[in-house]
Amino acid sequence: MQDVITQVSYLIAAALFVFSLRWLNRPTTARRGVAAGVAGMLAAVFGTLLHPEIVNFTWIAVAVLVGTAIGIPLSRVPLTAVPQRTALSHAFGGLAAGLVGTAKYQLWLGEGELTPFRTSAIAIEVLLGFLTFTGSLMAAGKLQEVIPTRPITYPKQNVINLSLLGIAIASGIGLVLNPENWMLFPVIVALSLLFGVLLILPIGGADMPTVISLLNSYAGLAAVAMGFVLENKLLITAGALDGASGFILSVIMCRAMNRSFANVLFGAFGQVQAAAAQGEQKAVKSATAIDAADYLANANSAVIVPGYGLAVAQAQHRVREVYDQLTRRGVTVRFAIHPVAGRMPGHMNVLLAEADIPYEALVEMDEINGDMPQCDVCLVVGANDVVNPAARSDRSSPIYGMPIIDADKARVVLAIKRTMNPGFAGIDNALYSADNTLMVFGDAKAVLSDIAGALRAEQEGQAAA
Amino acid sequence: MHELDLFSMLFVLVLATFVGFQVIQNVSRLLHTPLMSLTNAISAIAIVGSLIIAGEQKTTFSMLLGLVAVAASVTNIVSGFLITDRMLKMFREKGGK
């Protein structure tokens, strides 16, 4: 009977998890999704605690308290640090899978219960779990910039990394053929841990959105493997949902940068192109913040293209002031969001939502590009490569083929930039020297404050007159 | 284990993956960051396995690994759900608050 209750609660949990994700399709129902997820998790934990094998609750309570004590502060990080937090949680997920696999191996080894199927499932679980653990720690380190964000390379890197993975897989096969040969087990663990580190070393900061998504997928697959080890269908279901989600996000990120998985993982992007930027500087036109405010105030429709530079300058609230001032005058203001505008999928949306910008104003690249020729003023803040027309026209450019926001098609482009130094990938941007572009030089936060101030002053002047 | 069990598990895997692809493709692109933190929390369902290993106390070694796994999973559950909700609260409609 108790077993039936357990299975029923697992079934309910699985259904609730599907609903949880389903309700994320719209911002209006999304919070219901969280509630469904929490309910599913509680059902699953309740069902599990009914297991008669569980005899010791004291230590479990301690572990739950420890987890809660770590989890609560991790949920309160600033939103710019959400990518690091996400990477850390992938690491915890991988760690849990790896540890459960290890414990199961030890138990079944002692009991002589290691079938070839169980051993293969454990080998896969441990491999994926531990490589996700160290790989995600590395990714978190790079995002937090405690580890250098530039790609770290050494000779024969790909050959060495893949050979290590090969040896780990071969050890896994050896273990399946002879499960009693336990000496192979620590070899698999050590190689997986090492491979996770080496996998992330050559990946540069700009590729982090893809890498986080990929590690998300691995963490899901590790949970699936754990499901096969424990013969638990709820684990398989939830892990598969997570794995599918991570996979879809990785594909979206790769497409947004026009790269393949192989290229992200083995390409060491972002260090070779530095030399390409030394071409002659073309003449650019510049404008002051007051000019910019004037252009914006007289527009019918304005599009703001935010890049991660906006978040680095902590200028989200300033851009909101500009948004408020303009909407009050009847200017239609929309934000054009490139998929890789932040440090992880959807990151820029969250940063702007925090600054109280309504989500209807946040428009995806594909949706806004058709409207760009009708746009009066396009304001580019902290974005560079994602508005570089070379991606459309210049076959020799390293970013050729990458989908971009067609900022250059607007009647007037205002680009806020500190200096004329090339951007992250070190590529010249023809947008800045285009005839319809005016550069507003300065720190994004300061310039946006000045624009907002000028708009406010003009408004007050009109009110007084 | 019975071979049929293996196949029923593979069935679950394949079907859940298809459901996952369908559902996730419909998730608003606005919400991809909350999506990732929510799936993080959901995949901390690994707590189910961790609880059994920790609670059955077969060996000290397995219990210790199980307890660390429980702590890691709880961390993901707590921080994952809380931060997802925190982010979703920020998405407001025009004019609404």
Image: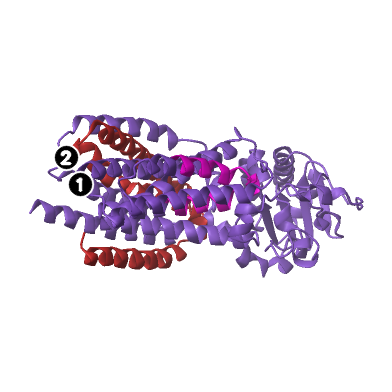
Chain colours: A purple, B red
Reading the image, the residue beneath label 2 is: A54
Q: Which mark is residue A115?
A: none
Q: Is there CB contact under 8 Å for labels 2 and 1? A: yes
Between disc 2 and disc 1, the foreground one is 2
Disc 1 is placed on an element classified as helix
Image coords of residue A159 (percent x, y): 62, 51
Image coords of residue A52 (percent x, y): 12, 43
Local crowd at mark 2 within 10 Å, few (<14), some, or many (≥20)? Answer: some
Q: Is residue A192 magenta?
A: yes
**In the rendered structure, which segment of residues is drawn in magenta?**
A190-219
Residue sitting nearer the eye, A442 or A16: A16
**A411 vs A40: above or below:** below
What's the residue type where badge 2 is placed? Answer: Ile
What's the residue type where badge 1 is placed? Answer: Thr
Instruction: Specify the quadrant of the image occupied by residue B22.
Output: bottom left
Disc 2 is placed on an element classified as loop
Which quarter of the image is occupied by the N terminus of chain A? bottom left
Instruction: Specify the quadrant of the image occupied by residue A20.
Output: bottom left
Chain hosting mark 2 = A
Per the model, the C-alpha gap separating discs 2 and 1 is 9 Å
Residue sitting nearer the eye, A269 or A327: A269
Q: Which mark is residue A48?
A: 1
Instruction: Specify the quadrant of the image occupied by residue A130.
Output: top left
Q: Which residue is drawn at the image coordinates 25% and 55% (left, top)?
A: A231
| Residue A320 as seen in the image, left or right of residue B62 | right
The answer, for residue A70, to whether it is visible in the render is: yes
To the question of a shared chain for discs 2 and 1, the answer is: yes
Toward the bottom, the furthest residue is A370
The answer, for residue A348, to whether it is visible in the render is: no
Q: Which residue is drawn at the image coordinates 67% and 38% (left, top)?
A: A313
Q: Which residue is drawn at the image coordinates 35% and 67% (left, top)?
A: B14
Image coords of residue B43 (percent x, y): 36, 50
